[in-house]
Amino acid sequence: MGSATGYPACPRLNNADRDARERLRDWEGLHIPQPEPRRREQAGRCMNCGVPFCQSGFGCPLHNLIPEWNGLIAAGQDREALERLLMTAPFPEFTGRVCPALCEKACNLADEGVTDRDNELYLIETGFEKGWVVPRPPLCRTGKQVAVVGSGPSGLAAADLLNRMGHSVTVMERADRPGGLLMYGIPNMKLEKSVVARRIALMEAEGIRFQLDTEAGPDNTAGFDAVVLCGGARKPRGLDIAHRDAEGLYFAVDYLTAATRGILSGTAPDVSAEGRHVVVVGGGDTGNDGVATALRQGCASVIQLEMMPEPPYRRPEGNPWPQWPRVKRTDYGQMEAAAVTGRDPRVYGTTVKGVTVDGMNRITALETVSLDERHMPVPGSEKILPCGLMLIAAGFIGCDEGTERSFGLAADGRGRLMKDGSHHLGGRLFSAGDMRTGQSLVVRAIADGRAAAGEVDDFLRGEKI
Ligand SMILES: Cc1cc2nc3c(=O)[nH]c(=O)nc-3n(C[C@H](O)[C@H](O)[C@H](O)COP(=O)(O)OP(=O)(O)OC[C@H]3O[C@@H](n4cnc5c(N)ncnc54)[C@H](O)[C@@H]3O)c2cc1C
Ligand code: SF4
């Protein structure tokens, strides 16, 4: 415990965000770090509770030793704090930026929880700045070869731990840059791509090989002692409408990928929202990233449609602490839209009835309809919205069928590659991350990749798993 008075004497203070109008002019990060004394004060709010719910099953999936490193930060022992953090968290620079911070909502202080995510980010960035984060290759090698298929957070976490255990790891990635959705999915303002590249360089210096532009299959993984499939769950849910092939209609992840490619290569993106009326179908996080990206590209207008009714502002009955609160949240993209247009871009309880195209099969408008509490269309509630770019962000329905088929595997009814709840699929094959659990969170993918690495290690050592 870093401070005797802690949270009663010091209110919670998040890292501030840059002004919404200012940040819309660039693709740089959103947050402004706080000065060091403020950070120590915030870490000192942690009271090192006897039962730290932040570390429990309701809190951090990595079971980070949160009270320990908060106490060390408050005491000015940053290097020791970082060492405690790195014992369980391989990539705090990712989770410190994009994690929804399950730990903070599970904290005994509930909505006033300690700013664990900002503290974690402070620690890792201080570590990089001061040269404490250096390559740590294993002291000896086991002679076993492991292929990791996919370089998203689960693949990176599995590769990192297997390499530390002394196995020789090759990561195969079909894309031209590593990182999975950390690279092509989550936009640059939420997670700068230089941060991903910095970690990959460190992993390479620790002995992990990355093969990019490589489609992994049974042939090129045949020589490995074990193969961990971390291919993600990127099969998007479509919409049951006519003109699905219209020009101007995209899955949000494809649009976000094109935007990031454009930024990284310094060229115009393959598809842009510039000057277009944009409708994002899906009110979740992916949709929010679509709103923020469209605004930066200079869209004419942006609306986000959500099928579900507007969530309450306070926890509903049956959703008590320490469960994740199912309340209305306004994310950075929605705040930016409100700063520009004066209103939240989300329209609740609404879905798409149909789209209109011109003679060149280009989308020009769409028809929406309101839904009642049974999700049935309300007669007479139809509206026409101008639309030159429609982004579908309606969720994901399972893993990539190409990878599933090529390895001769069959996903379960929810599109997941798992067997009896374990990571081991049989023979030399294992799975981890969204491919095993369905679309989830970066922190959960990291935890799952580390759990898979443990099972692979047991297998390679000939132990029963
Ligand atoms: C737009 C968007 C924003 C998100 N924002 C957040 C957020 O802010 N916070 C958060 O916690 N979570 C967020 N998520 C969820 C999070 O990104 C995922 O849960 C996480 O990335 C899953 O990691 P993964 O390693 O399992 O898979 P992925 O990140 O999907 O990586 C899978 C990789 O495998 C590769 N691959 C697949 N098959 C093969 C093959 N046969 N050969 C070679 N390579 C292959 C793919 O190319 C891909 O690079 C977001 C998701 C989306 C779509
Ligand atoms: S990874 Fe997420 S849940 Fe875990 S300590 Fe960091 S912010 Fe909290």
Image (cartoon, grey):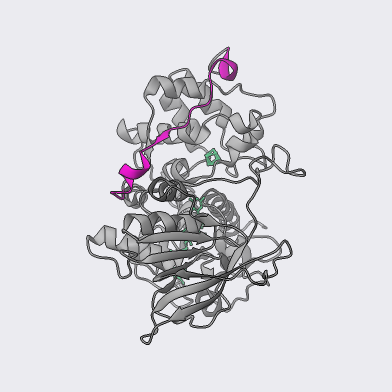
Q: Residue 330 placed where, x, y %?
A: 52, 46
Drawn side of residue 7 relative to residue 259, left or right: right
Q: Image point 56% across, 49% down: which residue?
A: 447
Drawn side of residue 345 relative to residue 455, left or right: left
- Does residue 219 belong to the magenta stretch? no
- Residue lying at the far top of the rendered structure: 4
Q: Nearer the viewer, residue 150 or 348?
A: 348
Q: How many marks?
A: 0
Drawn side of residue 369 relative to residue 22, left or right: right
Q: Is residue 186 visible?
A: no
For the C terminus, give its image quadrant.
Answer: bottom right
Q: Residue 409 placed where, x, y %?
A: 60, 76
For the N terminus, give its image quadrant.
Answer: top right
- Residue lying at the far left of the rendered structure: 266
Q: Is residue 165 visible?
A: yes
Residue 189 vertical placement versus 364 (above, below): above
Q: Bounds of the magenta span? A: 5-27
Q: Residue 403 placed where, x, y %?
A: 51, 74
Q: Residue 133 placed where, x, y %?
A: 36, 37
Residue 43 vertical placement versus 428 (above, below): above
- Residue lying at the far bottom of the rendered structure: 359
